[in-house]
Every structure is written in structure tokens, then in C-alpha cells.
Amino acid sequence: MLAFGSVMGVWIEPVDSDNTRMTVITKRRAQRDKFTDLTASRFYERFEKGIKIIKSGKELPVIPPSK
């Protein structure tokens, strides 16, 4: 079985009443894959876009919006 793409883990924890710490780890599924499509910076970009969508009162789409 071939497995392409990437996997990730995200930990979100409160630091204090005004701050939150987020840790993101991404990893290629197969070490022979030279690139991972999901990088930490791409995750943060999409996460920020998702927060903006939620704050605007809309629901998050099933398929991520394009850039």
C-alpha cells in the first residue's frame, strides 16, 4: 500500500486568560517522499483563515477555500 501526503499533530493549550500556545508537528507519511504538502506555516495560514471565517459568523467549509 502506498501512502502519500503528510500527517500532523496539533496541541492547543491556554497559557493565561489572554494567550494560547499552539504546537504543530508535520511529518511525511513516507520518508521517500521529498516534500510534504502540509507544512507548519501552511497550517497556520489555514488556521488563521478558519478563525476569520468563524468570527464572521459563517460555518467552516468542508473543502478549504483557495488562497
Image (cartoon, rainbow, N blue to C red):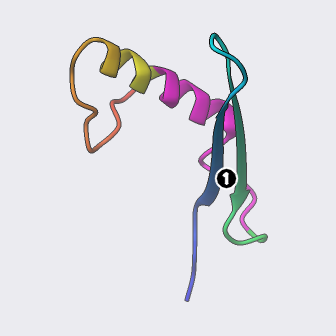
Q: Which residue is mark 1?
A: 36
Residue 59 picture location, percent across and down: 22, 29
The quadrant in which the C terminus is found is top left
The residue segment tinted magenta is 33-48
**From this viewpoint, which residue is outermost toward the left?**
58
**Quadrant for the N terminus in the image:** bottom right
Q: Is residue 8 above or below residue 31?
A: above
Q: Residue at x 36, y 29 (%)?
A: 66
The residue depicted at 65 percent of the width and 52 percent of the height is 9
Q: Position of residue 63 (x, y in %)?
A: 29, 43
Tell me if mark 1 has few (under 14), some (14-19) or many (20+) residues whose alpha carbon lies within 10 angstroms of its own: some
Compare residues 66 and 18 and report the one nearer the observer. 18
Is 45 situated left or right of 21 in this image? Answer: left
Which residue does the image show at 60% across and 33% down from the upper left? Answer: 42
Measuring 72% from the left and 57% from the top, which residue is drawn there? Answer: 27
Which secondary structure lies at badge 1?
loop
For residue 59, above or below residue 4: above
**What amino acid is found at the position of numbered circle 1 in the picture?**
Thr
